[in-house]
């Protein structure tokens, strides 16, 4: 009865009429944890409503139980707010509570808005390029989506979170988040299902949106790159005057318009985005924030190119990086996306806090075009193509209830978290492909022929619905310098697949699973903190395999040991971790058709990660990352694949970035930065016979600030290295980014 009730609620959340949604001009990208400025206990009691008088001893006991912000860094950091320079001290992603990173027994990386500004990423996966354990931009210059691997596994589909709530996708109904609206991006590596439900066992990327601020925000920026892609963005907000006794009202609006070309002919990268938000604080203990966003993207599908002609020479040499395999009169890729949600937090007592966070998201995507299918005649540079169409519409609803209770049992200080969350997801999935498209010459392409009609019978025509309910509990126990984290969760899931044309139920499955985590970390007084953790995960994948059957749930387990170092009198930290991660029922590309997927038995990832982040001086900020792992198929029905590394996955990543800004003297305000990225070799085939070479890339930034103005020039791939980012198969390779130079100017007041 309990499961039916909660799953019915999840269903009601997601099955909202799309017609009413279309009438709403602004939906949202919402958040999980509302920002709360930490007030001292005395201030809270003066501003809150009168309460029964307590004895001095009772008040002192309550004050001692309340989690204390760090005082040794000069600034009280909010884990949902700005990062000071490049170094974050606290994070909410690892525990869903306000926890120091040095007390979290799991690998966590945080990229703040200042680092995002300095590096000028064009999309989310570029934000992750200098993060340990992450291979960002798997498919190179593809502008449609954000692509990344964590610890060797694809995680952009089930590992993307916005403000603590998931934005997963299947088929082509993917989500797009804008760097201009990111306050911070947190990467939690390793299984996280114990708190977040179905998610990638290799980790999650949790984007924290910019929120209404108590200080006025007035910012505008414009820029253009060498491909003629220009943008104008703005960020405005601050407090709104209210009558005495009505509390505090804050607002913020972030927006951007982007238009222009890319390195591939006839492939624009056009984005339109706006995100308003409002926060109401009726008193010091209550915060309610409403967030909305709407965006539209207009581009075209990237090329699927052969291994010969990209990685190796064809008889004529290499395919030009600007070659467009489709036809501009046929091809298109459009995404319309809306979100609406809220975050509520209430301090019920000094020791008890309730949070409720919700979001409804809608995406409507159309993908049409001619897609490369390998050589028909390599000697004449003639590439075969097939006809493709996908129309995917998806709704996703999330509701997360959290109750945080802080108490002591003798010398042990507890932070208990109790949670119940509901998820509802539905996708209207229509896909069709056919043949009959004429080949194209990659050296002398011809466009504009009559459009080839699609087959009248699609190969996918389904309505898939999934309802999830989960309950979780976590105890963070602190005894002296020891911190123990114990977490457990149980999930109930119902998944159904129906025919879109008849409504008939084709397939259905019910699943139930427990996942858990145990971690221990010890903080020495000298700033060294060794830790160990073990965790399991469970992910009921939404989607269909190559046989049009519902995916089996994915499971995972990981053991991790590591050490975190935050030297005294030094604004920075270092992290080293070693892990053994097993991922079962992994969805992998079908070698016979790169548009389809099957589930292999088990893939193992074992490796080491090193990361350093520092505000070394007031002028110098540094980032360094090293990742090396052995990724291999450990179980499979095809015995020849055991021990082989999946395609698209390099096994070594090294990066480093530095930025220096003069703070005084004649060069005051002038700064420069640069970075180097090494991406190791990978494979283009499951048998590991076709190697994609490693590549070394350099980035550069030069900037100058004067009064309220800031100008900058950012360069990606400084030497204009032509390289292949990855290959999914011998006929599906993807060029990486060519040199991209972006000039920008901004003004704040």
Image (cartoon, grey):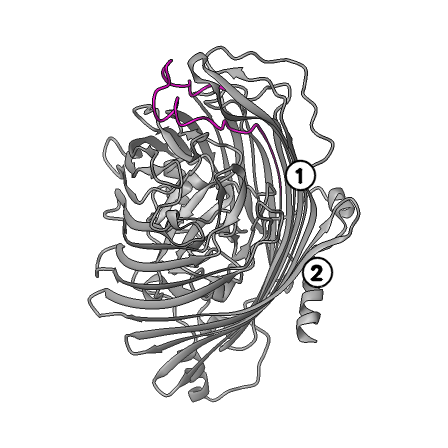
Vertical order, 641 against 373 (above or below): below
Viewer-proximal residue, 523 or 352? 523
Name the residue beneath numbered marker 1.
459
Dot 1 alpha-carbon crowd within 10 angstroms: few under 14, some 14 to 19, many 20 or more? few
Residue 518 visible somewhere in the drawing:
yes
From the viewer's perspective, is the residue at label 1 or at label 2 nearer? 1
Indicate the secondary structure of the residue bearing disc 1. Answer: loop
Q: Position of residue 383 (x, y in %)?
A: 50, 20
First of labels 1, 2 by sequence position: 2
Residue 296, magenta (yes or no) = yes
Q: Position of residue 451 (x, y in %)?
A: 67, 19
Q: Position of residue 227 (x, y in %)?
A: 46, 21
Viewer-proximal residue, 73 or 33? 33
Q: What residue range appears in magenta?
A: 294-323
The quadrant of the rendering that contains the N terminus is bottom right
Q: Quadrant of residue 310?
A: top left
Name the main secondary structure of what is drawn in magenta. Answer: loop
Residue under the point 50% across and 24% down: 229
Q: Which mark is residue 11?
A: 2
Label 1 – label 2 distance at C-alpha? 27 Å
Q: Position of residue 35 (x, y in %)?
A: 51, 59
Indicate the secondary structure of the residue bearing disc 2. Answer: helix
């Amino acid at each position: 009865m309990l499961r039916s009730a909660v799953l019915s609620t999840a269903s009601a959340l997601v099955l909202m009429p799309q017609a009413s949604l279309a009438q709403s001009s602004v939906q949202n990208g919402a958040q999980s944890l509302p920002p709360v400025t930490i007030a001292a206990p005395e201030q809270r009691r003066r501003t809150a409503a009168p309460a029964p008088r307590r004895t001095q001893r009772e008040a002192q006991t309550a004050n001692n139980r309340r989690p204390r912000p760090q005082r040794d860094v000069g600034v009280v950091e909010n884990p949902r707010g700005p990062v000071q320079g490049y170094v974050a001290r606290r994070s909410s992603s690892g525990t869903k509570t306000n926890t120091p990173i040095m007390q979290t027994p799991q690998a966590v990386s945080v990229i703040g808005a200042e680092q995002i500004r300095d590096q000028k990423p064009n999309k989310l996966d570029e934000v992750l390029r200098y993060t340990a354990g992450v291979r960002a931009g798997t498919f190179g210059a593809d502008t449609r989506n954000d692509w990344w691997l964590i610890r060797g596994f694809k995680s952009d589909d089930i590992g993307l979170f916005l403000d603590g709530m998931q934005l997963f996708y299947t088929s082509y109904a993917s989500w797009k988040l804008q760097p201009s609206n990111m306050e911070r991006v947190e990467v939690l590596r390793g299984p996280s299902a114990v708190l977040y439900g179905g998610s990638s066992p290799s980790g999650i990327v949790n984007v924290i949106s910019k929120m209404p601020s108590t200080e006025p925000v007035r910012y505008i920026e414009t820029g253009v790159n060498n491909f003629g892609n220009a943008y104008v963005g703005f960020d405005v907000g601050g407090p709104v005057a209210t009558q005495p006794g009505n509390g505090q009202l804050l607002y913020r609006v972030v927006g951007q318009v982007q238009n222009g070309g890319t390195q591939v002919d006839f492939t624009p990268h056009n984005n339109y985005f706006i995100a308003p938000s409002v926060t109401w604080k009726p008193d010091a203990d209550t915060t309610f924030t409403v967030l909305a966003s709407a965006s539209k993207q207009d581009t075209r599908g990237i090329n699927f190119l052969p291994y010969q002609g990209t990685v190796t020479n064809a008889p004529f040499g290499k395919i030009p990086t600007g070659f467009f395999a489709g036809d501009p009169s046929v091809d298109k890729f459009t995404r319309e996306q809306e979100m609406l949600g809220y975050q509520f937090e209430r301090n019920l007592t000094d020791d008890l806090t309730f949070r409720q966070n919700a979001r409804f998201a809608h995406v409507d995507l159309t993908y049409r075009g001619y897609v490369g299918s390998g050589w028909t005649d390599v000697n004449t540079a003639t590439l075969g193509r097939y006809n493709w169409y996908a129309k995917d519409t998806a709704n996703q609803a999330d509701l997360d209830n959290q109750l945080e209770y802080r108490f002591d049992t003798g010398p042990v200080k507890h932070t208990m978290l109790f949670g119940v969350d509901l998820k509802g997801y539905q996708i209207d999935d229509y896909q069709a492909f056919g043949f009959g498209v004429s080949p194209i010459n990659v050296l002398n392409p011809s466009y504009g022929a009559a459009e080839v009609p699609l087959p009248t019978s699609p190969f996918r025509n389904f309505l898939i619905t999934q309802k999830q309910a989960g309950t979780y509990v976590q105890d963070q126990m602190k005894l002296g310098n020891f911190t123990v984290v114990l977490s457990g969760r149980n999930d109930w899931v119902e998944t159904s697949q129906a025919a879109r044309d008849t409504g008939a139920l084709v397939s259905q499955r019910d699943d139930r699973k427990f996942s858990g985590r145990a971690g221990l970390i010890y903080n020495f007084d000298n700033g060294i903190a060794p830790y160990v953790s073990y965790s399991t995960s469970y992910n009921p994948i939404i989607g269909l395999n190559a046989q049009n059957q519902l995916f089996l749930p994915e499971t995972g387990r990981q053991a991790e040991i590591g050490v975190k170092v935050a030297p005294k009198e030094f604004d920075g930290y270092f992290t080293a971790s070693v892990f053994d991660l097993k991922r079962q029922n992994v969805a992998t590309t079908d070698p016979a058709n790169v548009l389809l997927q099957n589930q292999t038995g088990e893939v193992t990832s074992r490796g080491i990660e090193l990361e350093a982040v520092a505000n070394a001086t007031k002028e110098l900020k540094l980032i360094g990352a090293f990742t090396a792992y052995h990724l291999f198929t450990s179980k499979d029905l095809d015995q020849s694949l055991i021990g082989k590394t999946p395609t698209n996955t390099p096994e070594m990543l090294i990066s480093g970035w530095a930025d220096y800004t003069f703070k005084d003297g004649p060069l005051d305000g002038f700064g420069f930065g640069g970075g180097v990225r090494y991406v190791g070799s990978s494979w283009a085939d499951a048998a590991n016979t076709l190697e994609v070479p490693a590549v070394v890339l350099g980035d550069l930034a030069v900037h100058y600030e004067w009064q309220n103005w800031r100008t900058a020039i950012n360069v990606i791939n400084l030497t204009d290295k032509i390289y292949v980012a990855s290959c999914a198969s011998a006929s599906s390779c993807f060029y990486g980014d060519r040199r991209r130079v972006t000039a920008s100017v901004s003004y704040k007041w």
